[in-house]
Image (cartoon, rainbow, N blue to C red):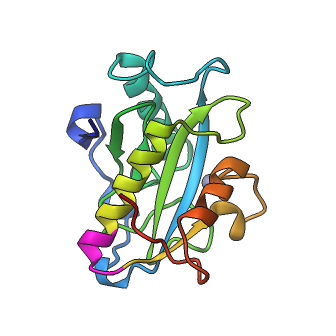
Amino acid sequence: MTEWITRDKWGAEPIRGDRLNHQSPDDIEEVVLHYADVYPEDYETGDEYAHNDAEFRTVKAIEQFHIHGRDWATIAYHTLIGAKDQIFVGRDTNMVGAHTLNHNQNTLGVCVLAGKGKGGAISLAQAANLCACLNLFVFIRGRSFKLAPHSDYVATGCCGDPLRNWITKVTDENGIYVPQG
Ligand SMILES: [Zn+2]
């Protein structure tokens, strides 16, 4: 079962309002996908990382880098897809993210937590939770949105070939996400 991990649950720091810009959920045009290769190379199913301290420490470490290393308001992404059943809440959708240079206004950033050296390969459970997350954004907004990899906007390998291929399977000819389920 998918579990949404609230900011309180994973121990997020208070948001630094002086670093924050707002956007209206009605204006959101696009979701940009990212991955972070934070799990060990032998990571496969995520069983060993689900619902334990290591998983929470991983998200906390990303947050600490974004706040204290980058001087940002809070963790950069709106949601993070955990090892198995968890979706971590990052920023509210009405807060501008810090995930894609020059492409943060009116977009949402979703980061899939993946294994090191796997090029962004994700498990079936993670794909299902990614769909659950995107479907919720469609539900909140009342219409769908463009779904694109980070590499469409910045010279980067992110979000990796497996996720880039996945995007082509869940979007229409205009790059609009087709709700799955
Ligand atoms: Zn990225």
Residue 145 versus residue 93 in the image, above or below:
below
| Residue 36 shown left or right of residue 95 in the figure | right
Quadrant holding the C terminus: bottom left
Residue 171 vs residue 103, the one in the foreground: 171
- In the rendered structure, does residue 169 fall within the stretch colored magenta? no
Q: Residue furthest right?
A: 155
Q: Residue furthest left?
A: 8
| Residue 158 shown left or right of residue 44 in the figure | right
Q: Kindly identify the residue that appears in the image at 51 percent across and 24 percent down.
A: 45
Residue 99 vs residue 41, the one in the foreground: 41
Residue 115: name its quadrant: top right
Q: Position of residue 68 (x, y in %)?
A: 49, 41
Q: Position of residue 16 (x, y in %)?
A: 33, 54
| Residue 106 shown left or right of residue 90 in the figure | right
| Residue 141 shown left or right of residue 83 in the figure | left
Q: Residue furthest front?
A: 181
Residue 82 vs residue 54, the one in the foreground: 82
Q: Is residue 128 visible?
A: yes
Q: Is residue 73 visible?
A: no
Q: Kindly identify the residue that appears in the image at 71 percent across and 62 percent down.
A: 151
Q: Kindly identify the residue that appears in the image at 47 percent across and 55 percent down.
A: 110
Image quarter for ligand 1:
bottom right
Q: Kindly identify the residue that appears in the image at 29 percent across and 39 percent down.
A: 2
Number of numbered labels in the structure image: 0
Magenta span covers which residues? Answer: 138-143
Q: Position of residue 116 (x, y in %)?
A: 67, 29
Q: Position of residue 23 (x, y in %)?
A: 35, 77
Quadrant holding the N terminus: top left
Residue 143: name its quadrant: bottom left
Q: Main secondary structure of the magenta part?
A: helix
